Image (tube, helix red, strand yellow):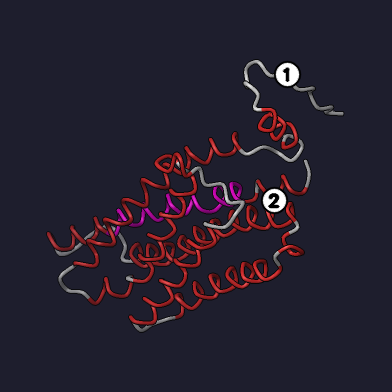
Amino acid sequence: MELKDAILLLHPAIAVLVVFPLIGIVVNRALQTRQRRLETKATGKSKIPPVAGQEHVQLGRWLTASVVGVVLVAFANDVFGNILDHQLWMKAPFQVIFIVLLFAATVGSLVLLYKAREKNWRALFATLTGIGLVILGCQDGVYRKTDQWYISHYYYGLTAALLMIFSLAILPEIYKDKSNFWRRVHISLNCIALLLFLGQGITGTRALLEVPLSWQEPYIQKLYEQKCDVKNCTIQAPSLR
């Protein structure tokens, strides 16, 4: 396996080792927090410890960073892979500089979002982070499958990341709002995000089958160039020695 292929597997490896375990723990703590709130309201006490709510908040903040991080890793692999393949640093150096600065600005905006306390600043940095992700996702080389957006790993992942960023931005408002409006918004959006994460597991597996390894790319490219019928086309098999 070449270095390029190892980097390609970095995104799914982080998702499996970090993101999906965190999702399970965060959902568990969310259910415990809600159960404790209902029991306390009904009887005045609950067997679920108060720390469940604190853990839900802290782990949720980690989950947001992990989701945005794993999306940026995937974008970086695709975008910079395209830059290297087409030698864009020679053909369009300003475009390459813009992309590098955009990656830095997106990461910086996310960091500032975590540090911001005022509502307006949180809204600003959440917006900048989301815009950065969207623009980076529109760059050449990113595997999108726009013609099948409804089952696209890219669109599921980008939407889930944007929902996580928004949930992080409104987190302080949940505890300030006595009408529970923001709490209901938080629950609704994260239920949608959970469904998207389930879809990510399915579409991500398919994407791993569809994206060729480096030694396969010349043969896949030859299929497209010759406009072969895949079932009937014959191309000399590569040497695996």
Q: Residue at x 54, y 61 (%)?
A: 136
Q: Pointer 1: what residue? A: 234
Which residue is situated farthest in the left direction here?
A: 42
Disc 2 versus disc 1: distance between alpha carbons? 30 Å
Q: Residue at x 32, y 75 (%)?
A: 172
Viewer-proximal residue among 34 and 74: 74
Range shown magenta: 11-33
Label 1 Cα crowd, 10 Å radius (few <14 / some 14-19 / many 20+): few
Q: In x, y percent, where is residue 146?
A: 47, 44
Q: In x, y percent, where is residue 195?
A: 36, 45
Q: Residue at x 68, y 53 (%)?
A: 82
Q: How many marks?
A: 2
N-terminal label among 2 and 1: 2
Image: 211 above or below 158: above
Q: Pointer 2: what residue? A: 7
With 108 as the anchor, is 155 left or right in this view?
Answer: left
Viewer-proximal residue among 78 and 22: 78
Please name the predominant secondary structure of the magenta segment in the image: helix
Q: In x, y percent, where is residue 102?
A: 57, 70
Which label sits on residue 56?
none
